[in-house]
Amino acid sequence: MITMVKITVTRMEKAPMGSRLEKYLEELPDTIKRDGYDGFLSFFTTLFMDCLDFLIQENTDISYIPKITLKLVHTHEQFKKEEQREIEHSESKENAKNQARAFVVGNTLRAQIYVDLATYDHIITKYGMPSFLLDLASTYFHELLHTMFPQKYEQAIYELQHHLVETFLGIELSKETKSLKSSDYYIKKEKGREG
């Protein structure tokens, strides 16, 4: 199984008071100031674990939790190389239309989620910290859902992802964001041809 995510960056100027997003926005600068880039990298893992724990708590119908590892890829070139290698060995019926930020490889027993750190550096610079946190949490939920519910279609994943992001971060996504369709981001592979 290989899935990829490319979602539109939802612009968020500030976090609602008392939300988990606000809490992260208060903690992250202190962590970076104290620990530098290592603190920034550590936050990727912390947020991932928080998303995983939340997903498990919210979904009582999860019968088995696979061993999931997170691989933070430091350069965009290395990420593309890893992604291409996996696409070549994939049996996926869909390809991402645009540049992916993350993808998951594995099965229901073991999975590894790859994250393109260079893309997230760009998101912070261009869209700001609130948008970065929203996008990263959304990406994590998307890939975790594919891992935990491999039988779900892409559109069902998107709908559940939006619900989880809103509940987890304590925010409300725009109707525009919630109305995105998987066909906006994926194309079906033609038989006998690669994407």
Image (cartoon, rainbow, N blue to C red):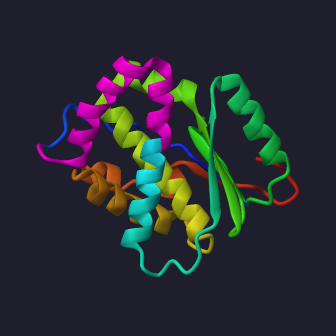
Question: What type of secondary structure mainly makes up the magenta span?
Answer: helix
Q: Residue at x 70, y 68 (%)?
A: 109
Task: Please state the horizontal and vertical placement of residue 74, each as a whole percent of the image.
Answer: 63, 25
The image quarter containing residue 147 is: bottom right
Viewer-side residue, 111 vs 97: 111
**Number of disc labels:** 0
Between 20 and 129, the one nearer to me in the picture: 20
Residue at horizontal 56%, vertical 29%? Answer: 117
Instruction: Say which residue appears at 52% left-offset and 63% top-offset.
Output: 145
Q: Is residue 26 visible?
A: yes
Q: Is 23 on the left-hand or right-hand side of 64?
A: left
- Which segment did they paint magenta? 17-45
Residue 69: x and y, percent?
63, 51
Q: Is residue 171 above or below residue 114?
A: below
Position of residue 84 relative to residue 195, above or below, is: above
* Residue 128 seen: no
44 shown above or below 140: above
Magenta span includes 38: yes
Instruction: Residue lying at the far front in this picture: please name it.
Output: 34
From what the image shows, is residue 164 above or below residue 65? above
Q: Residue at x 47, y 58 (%)?
A: 52
Where in the figure is residue 181, as x and y percent of width and height?
A: 45, 57
Q: Residue furthest left?
A: 17
The quadrant of the rendering that contains the N terminus is: bottom right
